[in-house]
Amino acid sequence: MMDRLGTGRLGRFLVGLPPYAWLALFFLVPFLIVLKISLSEPSAGAPPYLPLWDWDETGALAFHLTLGNYATLFGDELYAFAYLNSIRIAGIATLGCLLIGYPAAYAIARAPTAWRQSLLLLVALPFWTSFLIRVYAWIGILKSEGMLNALLLWLGVISEPLQILQTDLAVIIGMTYSYLPFMVLPLYANLEKMDLTLLEAAADLGCRPFKAFVAVTLPLSMPGIVAGSLLVFIPAVGEFVIPDLLGGPDTLMIGKVLWAEFFDNRDWPVASAVAIAMLVLLVAPIMIIQNARTKAEEAGK
Amino acid sequence: MASQTTAAPWNDPGAKPLIRFEGVSKRFGDFVAVDQVDLAIHKGEFFSLLGASGCGKTTLLRMLAGFETPTEGRIFIDGVDMSAVPPYERPVNMMFQSYALFPHMTVEANIAFGLKQDRLPQPVITDRTKAVLDLVQMGKFATRKPHQLSGGQRQRVALARALAKEPKVLLLDEPLGALDKKLREATQLELVNIQDRVGVTFVMVTHDQEEAMTMSSRIGVMNSGRIAQVGTPVDIYEYPESRFVADFIGAANMFEASVRQSGTDQVVVNCPELAHDLIIAHNDMLPEGTPVTVMVRPEKVAISRDKPAEGLNWAQGVVADIAYLGDVSIFHVRLESGHRIEALQTNLRHTDERKLTWEDPVYLSWHPANALVLTK
């Protein structure tokens, strides 16, 4: 008995080891490297930062830790502005994904069983094409002489082309489009397992269909809404490719700032500080909230 | 139960039924779930739809609630045609088999949900919620969520929620199906008591005949989409109108026979399984040679070593099997023809000197009034 329990535990440990080792090696270690760089002083050499510690002339160990890079973030309002703008754009894109994704997920979840797999496949179908190509395609749609403007001109809605490309709107459209499947899939998983008898019960108790949706379906799908929104919002905040390709010079987003610090300014320590700050300011609160939610749900069960 | 059997509005031809099914059919593709059902249910009844799974009883109930639309026919509640009335406007409430309590709401909120839809003032909602919770003895659990309740408690909340709106008709879909046997038996009587107190008409779907017999004022036995017979539990058990109902409700001994002679109050039939003719009380004249089935319930059959008195129907055989159930024993007696008859005997004494045992030759007998001739 002891032996069986023992091997069971060892087996579980062995099964759990690879993913944890993977995460430690390719997530935790790089994170620590970035953290280290963010605390070091910039230099003109290669690598473009000074080591955190070395041995001075007397042979004693000397540390060169600095919080100066973080001070820079607070000192220049460009960074704060970029953070807030990233949150705003990602927030609007998340809302857009929710407004399009919820009805889509609902429709798929209520479609005849035989159709559901095909409809889900259609949602995931864009993944078969390169993300980059799909974002480039939006340039063709949104540019001044692009398809959207041509259509609107032809319909007579507008008399001269709209400037959509190289604005925040283009970035929001691009993000909403790109991240839509990440909203639809968790929402579908949630809506699909809902007990439809509950809606019959609501109707039986005198509740009209739309009100039943608001009073029953919507609150019960909240975990799906939260999961989908986080899956869209978190990567959207740090997104670089979409604002770079669709946004204009005024589209200030943290991903672009990061790129500029790394490659244009070659200021790795400040770039690393930007990355760490983003993690602390954004992901940490969300993780804490999620953790509290999970605990509350478990306590409720 | 006793109070219900005294009043019998279904025997009064002038009485206006509360619920009327008129030629109602429901087809799902090629499958006929409900087939030409005519049925009248009266105010204050505890009516059960009884049948095996797939007999159409649940579909009939769901059409009454408005979740399914009849393919043909019409349903009236209180004289109003329900054809165009959506479920949320019908004067009925349902207690679902799975209870269908809203998991994100407290017990209170679940019960208040229906009342809020009627836009009642908050004090009325609070009072009524409390009243129905007390009715089902769940007052202490008002602020719990459904997942914090046991199965029996959820069942009570579901009942309270359905009763809170004071519907004209309460529909119950296998209301006790999810409870264990002990709790089910206790709840059966309680449900009947609650119905007595609130005076609401109950229509229940069940596959459990004991449950239907215990609780109902009348039972509608269903078989492949049709109503086989409607009657009080006594009617259904003592006077089944067809082989199906006789066989479905309780145990029955049946013999194939043909009419030899028919009188005004009895009929003489010839039964190939038996050496002699049987005499059975029967009110209708039947032409000679009509093929019939003779049915007699096991508890109506007496078993003895001695030849029974004159005037009784009797048969001779040997004990093939004995099922001892504690309170009663069921004797399976094999006739000379090989046909088996069940006889039920109450075990009145701790020990019986003259106890029958396997392979004992015995006589079986029953009174002409205690058997039935079935022609359907």
Image: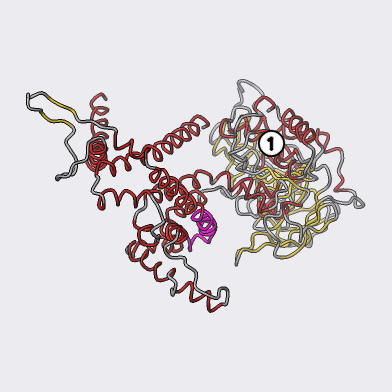
The answer to whether any part of residue B313 appears in the image is yes
* Location of residue B359 by image quarter: top right
Seen as rendered, the residue at the extreme right is B14
Amino acid under label 1?
Answer: Ala
Q: Relative to residue B17, is residue B109 drawn left or right? A: left
Tell me how many marks there are: 1
Q: Is residue A67 one of those drawn in magenta?
A: no
Seen as rendered, the residue at the extreme bottom is A154
The picture places residue B140, in percent across and down from the top left corner, at 67, 24
Q: Relative to residue A289, is residue B108 drawn left or right? A: right
Magenta stretch: give its range: A96-117
Q: Is residue A31 above or below residue B373?
A: above
Task: Choose between B162 and B26: the one closer to the eye.
Answer: B162
Q: Relative to residue B141, is residue A299 drawn left or right? A: left
The picture places residue B269, in percent across and down from the top left corner, at 73, 54
Q: Is residue A108 one of those drawn in magenta?
A: yes
Q: Which residue is mark 1?
A: B302
Task: Choose between B18 and A153: the one closer to the eye.
Answer: A153
Please give the name of the residue rendered at 45% of the width and 51% of the height, measured from the top-left corner: A90
Please give the name of the residue rendered at 48% of the width and 76% of the height, measured from the top-left corner: A150
Q: Is residue A188 above or below residue B237?
A: below
The answer to whether any part of residue B270 appears in the image is no
